[in-house]
Image: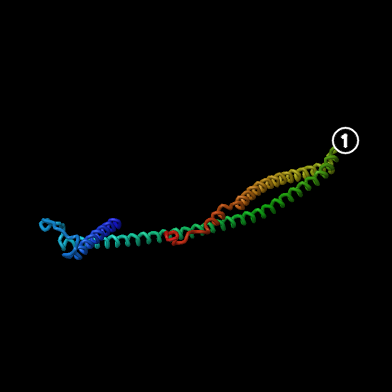
Amino acid sequence: INRDAQHALEQDLCDKHSAHCIDEKCCKLRNTSDSINFYHGAEKADGTISVPATWAKFSEDNIRGSQHARANSVKLRDDAEAGLKSTAQEMWNHFISTNLAFHNRIAEVADAKNKLQAQLGKLLQEIFQAEDTIMLLERSIKAKEYPLKVAQTCLEARTKRPNIELCRDAPQLQLVTEVCTIDDTLQILKRCLQEAHDTLQMLNLYKSKLEHEISVKANSFIDKKCTDMCKVFPSTPQLIGYA
C-alpha cells in the first residue's frame, strides 16, 4: 500500500513538474521570442482530459490515499512493535523462570547428595558395628568350642570305664547336660553369626547403591553447564530488533 501511494505521489508530482515547466515556458513567450510559430488548428483540438475540479480532486485523492497509507503503516508498525515488546517480555519471563528452575534443580540435587552422604555415613557406622558383632560372635563360638571339647572328651573317656563302673552317675548326667547346653548355645551363636553375615552383605549392597547414587549426583554437571550457558541473554532492544 505504501509503495502504491508513493508511486502515485511521485507520478503526480512528476506530471505537475512537467506541466509547471510548460506553463512557465508559455508565460515567458513574447512576440519577439524565437520559438514561436504557426500551429493551424491548435485551437480546435482539445488537448485536455480534466477540468479544474477533477484536476484538484485527483491530487487531493492522492494526498488522502498517502495519508491513509501512512496512518495504516504507523498502526501496523505500532502493532508490530507492541507484539515484539510483548514477545520480548515473554521471552525474558521464560528466561528468568528457566534459570530459576535450573537453580532450584541444582539445589535439589545438592540437597539429595548431602542426604545420601549422611545416610552413607550412618550406613558405614552400621557396617562397622555389624563387622564388630561378627568378630565378637566368632570369638564367642571359638571360646565355646574348648569347653565342648573338654566335656565331650570326658564323656568319651568315661565310656571306657570297665564293667559295672560304666554307670550313668551324676557326673555323667552333668557332662551330658553341659554338652547339650554348650551345643545349643553354639547353634544359637552360629545362627546369629549367619544373620550378621547376611546383614553385613545387605549393608554392603546398600553401600554400593548409595555410593553409585552419590557418584551420579556428583557428576550431574549438565544443569550447571546449562545455567552457565543461560547467563547471557539478549536485551529487549535486541530482541525487538533495534540493535
Task: Please give the count of numbered marks on the rendered protein.
Answer: 1
Q: Quadrant of residue 22?
A: bottom left
Viewer-side residue, 51 vs 140: 51
Q: In the rendered image, which quarter contains the N terminus? A: bottom left
Residue 30 placed where, x, y %?
17, 65
- Indicate whether 105 appears above or below 146: below
**Label 1 crowd (10 A; few <14 / some 14-19 / many >=20):** few
Viewer-side residue, 180 vs 16: 16
> For this view, does 226 lie left or right of residue 152?
left
Q: In the rendered image, which quarter contains the C terminus? A: bottom left
Which residue is rendered at x = 44% and y = 62% of the image? 237
Using the rendered image of the protein, determine whether residue 56 is visible from the camera's viewpoint.
Answer: no
Residue 13 placed where, x, y %?
25, 60
Q: Callout 1: helix, strand or loop?
A: loop
Using the rendered image of the protein, determine whether residue 110 is visible from the camera's viewpoint.
Answer: yes
Viewer-side residue, 74 vs 41: 41
Residue 46 placed where, x, y %?
12, 57
Which residue is rendered at x = 33% and y = 59% of the image? 76
Q: Quadrant of residue 156?
A: top right
Q: Which residue is mark 1?
A: 160
